[in-house]
Image (cartoon, rainbow, N blue to C red):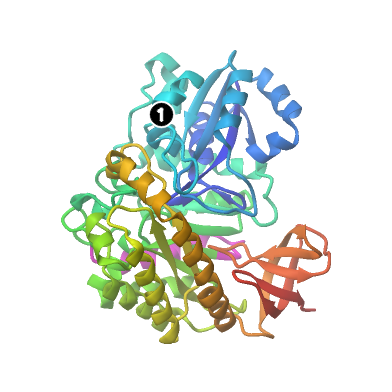
C-alpha cells in the first residue's frame, strides 16, 4: 500500500485562508487527486502545530511513507489565534530531516516565494529549490494525478488546469481529509473555491497582489461546487466560507475578460448559494470573504441585488472584506488599486444599507471589512493622515465596519512590486515610526468605538467556541469570517459552544460573560 504524508504549514493569501480553524483548498486537492487514482492510498494529514507538539510521532509516520507533501505560503501578513504558519527555519529543519524522502512543495510559496511577514521581501523560490525534489508551481491536482498515473518523472510541476473537471473530482474525493484536521468536530471552517484569478488581470491588477498573476479568470461550475459541499457535509463539515476568490460578486460575472469590473451575475450567485444550502444538511455557518469595492461602485444596483441574495442564504455575522488598501489617490494611481476614496465610501455605505440589521446570532447580517496596506510606492506621511481622516469620516457618518485590517505589504515574487522592492524597503524603514503611531491611534480612536456600536453592552451573541485560556479569561470565537475575539470571564471547558453577553471592550476585542 502506498503511504503519503501531507504536512500543512498553513496558507494565507489574498483569496484563501488555511490557518486554523480554516482549512484551505490545497490539502483536499492533493488528497483528492491521489485517491482519484488509487483509493487504497493511505494519507496521513498533519498540521505544523501538531508536528511542533510531537515531532517524534510525525517522523515515525514519515518513515513509512513514499513521499512528503508540504503545503506552505502565508503571503498575507496576519495575526492568528488558531495556529502559527510554518517558518523558514522550520522548513529547512524538517526537510533536512526528511532528505531521504521525495519532498514536494505545494501552495503559494511554490509559485510566489515564501512570505516572511509584513514589511518584508519574500524568500525567493530559487532559494527553496535545494530543499525539495519537486516544487509544484502549477496546480497540485494535475501534478499528483499525473505523478501517480504515469510516474513522477513524467509529471510537470508547472502545468496549470485548463478547466475545473479534474479539480472538481479532486475536491469531491478529497473532502474526507477534513476528518484528520485537529479542529474537526468543533470549529473547523472549510474554505470553498469558486474561481481562480482576478477579473482585473485585464488591466494588470494591484501592484502587490498574486491573484492577477494566474492569468485569465477560470470559473468553477455551480454543479461542481455543490457536489463538493455535498461530500463535505457527508464527512461532517458544518462551517463554510465561500472565500477562495478575490470577489464573490464577480462569480460568473458578465463580460469577464473584457472589463476589470464585470457586472454581477445575480442569477448565478443565487443558484450557487441556494445549491450549497440545499445539500449542506448540517450547515451552521455560511459566510463569504472578499468583495471588490470597485464592483459595487461601478454596478451599484446589481451589487445590491447580489448582496441581498447572499444575505438570503448565508448566516449572520458575515464580513465583506474590501481591499481598499489606501485612501490616498497618489497611492491608488501608483499601484493600480481598485477604487478611489469616494468610490470606497460608497461601497461601504451600500453594504451598510443592505446588511446592517442584526441577525439571530447577535451580530449584523453583513458588514464591510477594510484592508489598509502600507509601504506601497507613492506613500508619504500624508497617506497616513488621509487614511485616518477617511476612517473618522466613516465613523462620523454612523457607518459600521466589522474590522479594520492595518498591515505592511509583503513583496512577493512575480508581482509588479517585486521590481520595486528597494522602494518598498525604503518606505517601510522611513515610515516605521508614523506607521506604529497611526496604528495605535486607529485602535484607540476608531476600532473600540466601532465595536461598541456593533455590539452594545448587554448584546447576546450565540454559538461561540471556547478556544484557549488567557489572563484569567477564556478566549471564545464564532466559527466565522473574521470572527470577533471575546474575552469571557472565568475558565470554561475548551472546544465547547457557549452564548455570551457583552460587558466591556478592548481595542480590538470584546469582554463578555456567559449567558445562560
Residue 274 part of the magenta segment: yes
Tell me: residue 458, above or below residue 223.
below
Magenta stretch in the rendered image: 262-285
| Image quadrant in which the N terminus is located | top right
Q: Which residue is mark 1?
A: 125
Image coords of residue 81 (percent x, y): 64, 54
Q: Quadrant of residue 144?
A: top left
| Image quadrant in which the C terminus is located | bottom right
**In the drawing, does residue 38 fall left or right of residue 487?**
left
Image coords of residue 349 (percent x, y): 36, 80
Residue ID at (48%, 28%): 105
Q: Residue furthest left?
A: 258
**In the drawing, does residue 302 fall left or right of residue 168?**
left
Residue 96 part of the magenta segment: no
Tell me: residue 46, above or below residue 417.
above
Residue 402 visible? The answer is: yes
Residue ID at (52%, 35%): 71
Tell me: residue 42, above or below residue 256.
above
- Taking depth in this image into account, of 164 and 504 the one nearest to the observer is 504
Image coords of residue 385 (percent x, y): 37, 70
- Taking depth in this image into account, of 73 and 157 the one nearest to the observer is 73
Amino acid at each position: 500500500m502506498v503511504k503519503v504524508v501531507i504536512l500543512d504549514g498553513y496558507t494565507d493569501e489574498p483569496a484563501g485562508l488555511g490557518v486554523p480553524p480554516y482549512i484551505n483548498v490545497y490539502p483536499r486537492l492533493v488528497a483528492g487527486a491521489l485517491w482519484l487514482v488509487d483509493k487504497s492510498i493511505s494519507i496521513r494529514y498533519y498540521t505544523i502545530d501538531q508536528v511542533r507538539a510531537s515531532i517524534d510521532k510525525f517522523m515515525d509516520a514519515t518513515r513509512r511513507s513514499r513521499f512528503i507533501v508540504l503545503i506552505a505560503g502565508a503571503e498575507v501578513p496576519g495575526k492568528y489565534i488558531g495556529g502559527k504558519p510554518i517558518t523558514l527555519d522550520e522548513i529547512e529543519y524538517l526537510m533536512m530531516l526528511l532528505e531521504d524522502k521525495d519532498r514536494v512543495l505545494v501552495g503559494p510559496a511554490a509559485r510566489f516565494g515564501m512570505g516572511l511577514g509584513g514589511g518584508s521581501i519574500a524568500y525567493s523560490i530559487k532559494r527553496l529549490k535545494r530543499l525539495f525534489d519537486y516544487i509544484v508551481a502549477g496546480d497540485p491536482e494535475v501534478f499528483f494525478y499525473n505523478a501517480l498515473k504515469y510516474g513522477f518523472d513524467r509529471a510537470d510541476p508547472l502545468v496549470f488546469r485548463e478547466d475545473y473537471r479534474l479539480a472538481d473530482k479532486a475536491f469531491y474525493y478529497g473532502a474526507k481529509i477534513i476528518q484528520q484536521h485537529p479542529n474537526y468536530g468543533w470549529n473547523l471552517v472549510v474554505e470553498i473555491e469558486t474561481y481562480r484569478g482576478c477579473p482585473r488581470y485585464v488591466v494588470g491588477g494591484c501592484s502587490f497582489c498574486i491573484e492577477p498573476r494566474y492569468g485569465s479568470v477560470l470559473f468553477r461550475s455551480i454543479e461542481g461546487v455543490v457536489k463538493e459541499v455535498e461530500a463535505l457535509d457527508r464527512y461532517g463539515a458544518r462551517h463554510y466560507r465561500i472565500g477562495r476568490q478575490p470577489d464573490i460578486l464577480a462569480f460568473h460575472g458578465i463580460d469577464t475578460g473584457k472589463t476589470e469590473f464585470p457586472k454581477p451575475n445575480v442569477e448565478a450567485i443565487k443558484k450557487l448559494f441556494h445549491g450549497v444550502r440545499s445539500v449542506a444538511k448540517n450547515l451552521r455557518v455560511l459566510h463569504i470573504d472578499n468583495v471588490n469595492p470597485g464592483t459595487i461602485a461601478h454596478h451599484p444596483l446589481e451589487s445590491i441585488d447580489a448582496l441581498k441574495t447572499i444575505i438570503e442564504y448565508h448566516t449572520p455575522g458575515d464580513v465583506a472584506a474590501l481591499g481598499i488598501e489606501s485612501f490616498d489617490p497618489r497611492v491608488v494611481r501608483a499601484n493600480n488599486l481598485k477604487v478611489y476614496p469616494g468610490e470606497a465610501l460608497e461601497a461601504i455605505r451600500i453594504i451598510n444599507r443592505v446588511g446592517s440589521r442584526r441577525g439571530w446570532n447577535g451580530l449584523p447580517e453583513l458588514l464591510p471589512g477594510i484592508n489598509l496596506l502600507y509601504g506601497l510606492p507613492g506613500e508619504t506621511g500624508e497617506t497616513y493622515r488621509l487614511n485616518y481622516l477617511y476612517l473618522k469620516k466613516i465613523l462620523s457618518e454612523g457607518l459600521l465596519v466589522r474590522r479594520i485590517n492595518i498591515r505592511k505589504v509583503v513583496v512577493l515574487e512575480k508581482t509588479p512590486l517585486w521590481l520595486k522592492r528597494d522602494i518598498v524597503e525604503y518606505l517601510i524603514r522611513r515610515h516605521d515610526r508614523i506607521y506604529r503611531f497611526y496604528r495605535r491611534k486607529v485602535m484607540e480612536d476608531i476600532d473600540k468605538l466601532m465595536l461598541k456600536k456593533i455590539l452594545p453592552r448587554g448584546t447576546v451573541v450565540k454559538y461561540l467556541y471556547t478556544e484557549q485560556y488567557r489572563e484569567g479569561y477564556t478566549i471564545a470565537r464564532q466559527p466565522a469570517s473574521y470572527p470577533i475575539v471575546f474575552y469571557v470571564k472565568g475558565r470554561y471547558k475548551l472546544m465547547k459552544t457557549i452564548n455570551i453577553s457583552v460587558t466591556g471592550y478592548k481595542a480590538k476585542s470584546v469582554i463578555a460573560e456567559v449567558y445562560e
